[in-house]
Image: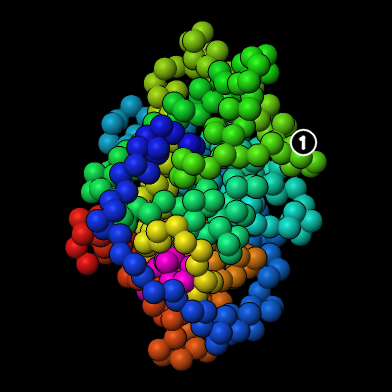
């Protein structure tokens, strides 16, 4: 969500760290190869989507229930960790929902919102209509990109602040849906502020969301109303002691941990080195990150295809379960000196270290 802290991060950009970079021309061979290998990979498999989502939800909420009810601290923490990872995976399907043609997976958006979006206070309208702007070729990396900040050019302290502010997300979401949403229906002018500034999963504080129209408006209203009812009902049950305070705090802690992990993943989704100018498709690809096998841990911190984030920017309509196949095909097809290989990295520590060194002016 957009926050005042995010604005401070924008102000933390370091002019002395900015360097003029030559424009990267599009590598036509790579783009042509990507188009060719993906011709049969665009169709989503409903069985995979539903099985993966339901399994993640069952494990996640089951582990959350154990974390709430177990009396032994060690066992409760272990259950909470499982809940965080499983529900993080389930929540990551919001990315797929924002890209899919809903006619190809009937009911999946509704099912995802009912099982994950509403209970975790992140309904899909918060991402749909926002994330697609990040993929617009003329917007990526510019001030019009809702999901981009030049983090590599900012002050060193901006990175821990960027991550730690995510821990406050559960409180912000409670306020957004439990207070601001209902008040915005009766307070003149508040609705415009809520829509523009507090209705998107963005990191660019300058981004202002437009009022939705048509089907998007209907989806927005239904999802927002459901989430507000959930939040107000939950707060009421906690206030009346029907839901124990400990259970509520564990629930918020799990959501906070999920958002922190996702924020760390966001740190390494791109190199964040663009200074605001429009970029070619190849430049956008090279500013993005793949963490392919044989690394195993990315399956946990970059689930549902997010480990192939750079490839996703080349092939945004390929469903997550086909990205590994697309990567293997492209790797075998392009030349050894192709830019395609330059977006692959070994793991999280090296990427975080690279970003941290960049904020300190170390290249």
Is residue 165 depicted above or below 24 in this figure?
above
Horizontal and vertical percent position of residue 225: 68, 26
Is 300 placed left or right of 128 in the picture?
left
Q: Nearer the viewer, residue 311 or 116?
A: 311
Is 212 placed left or right of 162 in the picture?
right
The colour scheme used here is: rainbow
Q: Which residue is drawn at 51% across and 8% down?
A: 240
Q: Identify the magenta region.
A: 283-295
Q: Is residue 287 magenta?
A: yes
Residue to which mark 1 is pinned: 218
Asked whether residue 219 is in view, the answer is no
Q: Quadrant of residue 75?
A: top left
Q: What element carries label 1?
A: helix
Q: Main secondary structure of the magenta part?
A: loop
Horizontal and vertical percent position of residue 265: 39, 53
Q: Residue at x 49, y 56 (%)?
A: 142
């Amino acid at each position: 969500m957009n926050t005042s802290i995010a604005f401070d991060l924008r102000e933390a950009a370091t002019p002395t760290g900015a360097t003029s970079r030559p424009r990267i021309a599009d590598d036509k061979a790579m783009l042509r190869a990507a188009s060719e290998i993906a011709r049969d990979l665009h169709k989503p498999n409903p069985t995979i989507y539903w099985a993966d989502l339901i399994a993640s939800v069952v494990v996640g909420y089951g582990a959350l229930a154990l974390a709430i009810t177990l009396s032994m601290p060690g066992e409760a923490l272990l259950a909470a960790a499982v809940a965080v990872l499983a529900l993080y995976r389930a929540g990551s399907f919001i990315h797929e929902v924002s890209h899919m043609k809903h006619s190809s997976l009937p009911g999946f958006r509704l099912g995802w919102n009912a099982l994950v979006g509403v209970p975790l206070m992140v309904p899909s309208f918060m991402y749909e209509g926002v994330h697609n702007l990040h993929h617009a070729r003329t917007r990526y990396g510019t001030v019009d990109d809702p999901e981009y900040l030049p983090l590599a050019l900012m002050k060193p302290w901006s990175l821990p602040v960027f991550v730690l502010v995510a821990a406050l997300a559960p409180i912000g979401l409670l306020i957004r849906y439990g207070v601001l949403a209902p008040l915005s229906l009766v307070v003149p002018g508040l609705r415009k502020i809520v829509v523009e500034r507090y209705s998107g999963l963005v990191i660019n504080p300058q981004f202002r969301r437009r009022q939705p129209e048509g089907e998007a408006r209907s989806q927005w209203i239904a999802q927002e109303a459901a989430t507000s009812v959930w939040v107000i009902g939950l707060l009421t049950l906690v206030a009346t002691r029907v839901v124990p305070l400990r259970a509520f705090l564990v629930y918020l802690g799990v959501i906070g941990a999920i958002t922190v992990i996702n924020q760390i993943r966001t740190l390494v989704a791109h190199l964040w080195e663009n200074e605001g100018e429009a970029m070619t498709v190849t430049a956008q690809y090279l500013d993005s990150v793949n963490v392919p096998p044989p690394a195993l841990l990315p399956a946990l911190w970059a689930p549902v295809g997010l480990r192939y984030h750079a490839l996703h920017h080349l092939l945004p309509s390929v469903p997550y379960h086909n990205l590994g196949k697309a990567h293997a095909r492209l790797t075998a097809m392009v030349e050894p000196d192709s830019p395609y290989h330059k977006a692959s990295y070994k793991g999280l520590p090296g990427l975080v270290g690279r970003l941290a060194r960049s904020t300190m002016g170390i290249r």
